[in-house]
Each structure stands twice: as C-alpha cells, then as structure tokens.
Amino acid sequence: KTLAAALAAADLVEVLEGPGPFTVLAPTDEAFAKLPAGTVESLLKPENKDKLRTILLYHVIPGRVYSDTVVTLKSAKTAAGLTAPITVKKAVGKAPATVMVGGSKVVKTDIDASNGVIHVVDAVILPE
C-alpha cells in the first residue's frame, strides 16, 4: 500500500504501467516502516516530489532481469540514472543464496508482470 501511495505521489504510476519492460525492486509496507519516523510522510509531500521520484526510480531497472541473471551481476543501472550495488552470498549447505541490492535483501523473486518482473525487497533502497 505504501509503495502504491508513493508511486501516485511521484506521478510514476503511468510510467510503470507503460510498455516496459521493467524490473521493479518492490519494498514491502514493512520495508517502508523501517525508515526513520516521519520519512514516508515527508517524502509524500508535493515539495519533495523530485526526491521521492529519484528514490522510487532507484528501485527500477530498465529491462526484464530475472533472478538467474541478477546473481551474476555486481551492480545494475537504475531508471534514476544511478548504479545500485548488488552483492550475492552463495548458498551454503541448506542455506539459500542471499541477494542484496543496495543494502536491501531480495526476499521474493521473479514475479511476472505484463510489462516486466518484480522482486520483493525488505528495505527501501536509498541512493548514496
């Protein structure tokens, strides 16, 4: 719900409903709740629209990038024009591989959408 509200406030709904393809790193509501108190409310204000757009576009990678490709990357160029670092910890024993994008853990992968693919992340990724 928080991501949907943020996308609307940043006027990005139509962009992401476009033909794509896009890879979206979608933070959960719990991910937004991890931000310092008042951050989300502040970002949703009209005067912070540009900052919000940059943060949200940092969660979008042009093209359809599935998890089998993500694990081979060291970074990805985002729709914000910034590069997000990718770290992969290989599976050990019964522990699965862990993929981190900009400090956020990918918790669900390869959710197909008509214009791309979604990977769910456990934290909002902030550009450095």
Image: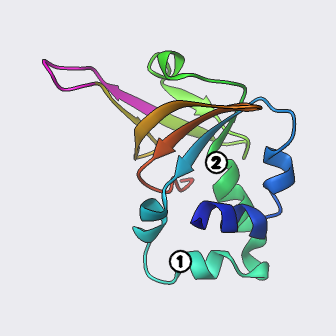
Up/down of 66 relative to 60, above or below: above
Which segment did they paint magenta?
86-96
| Residue 38 % position (x, y) | 51, 83
Q: Residue at x 42, y 39 (%)?
A: 106
The 10 Å Cα crowd at callout 2, few under 14, some 14 to 19, many 20 or more, is many
As measured in the structure, the alpha-carbon distance from the residue carrying label 2 to the one carrying label 1 is: 17 Å
Q: Which residue corresponds to mark 1? A: 39
Rendering coords of residue 105 (x, y %):
38, 43
Q: Secondary structure at mark 1?
A: helix
The answer to whether 54 appears left or right of 106 in the picture is: right
12 left or right, relative to 68: right
Comparing 79 with 128, the one in front is 79
Picture residue at 61% right of the left edge, 61% below the top: 3
Residue 126 picture location, percent across and down? 53, 56
Marks 2/1 in contact by CB < 8 Å: the verdict is no
Asked whether residue 30 is drawn in magenta, I would say no
Residue 87 lies within the magenta run: yes
Indicate whether 70 appears above or below 123.
Answer: above
Residue 52 located left or right of residue 96: right
Side (left or right) of 57 relative to 74: right
Given residues 49 and 117, the one toward you in this image is: 117
- Total marks placed: 2
Q: Secondary structure at mark 2?
A: loop
Q: Amino acid at mark 2?
A: Tyr
Q: Position of residue 81 (x, y in %)?
A: 73, 42
The quadrant of the picture occupied by the N terminus is: bottom right
Residue 122 versus residue 113 in the image, above or below: below
First along the sequence among labels 2 and 1? 1
Q: Quadrant of residue 66?
A: top right
Q: Which residue corresponds to mark 2? A: 58
Q: Residue at x 68, y 68 (%)?
A: 5
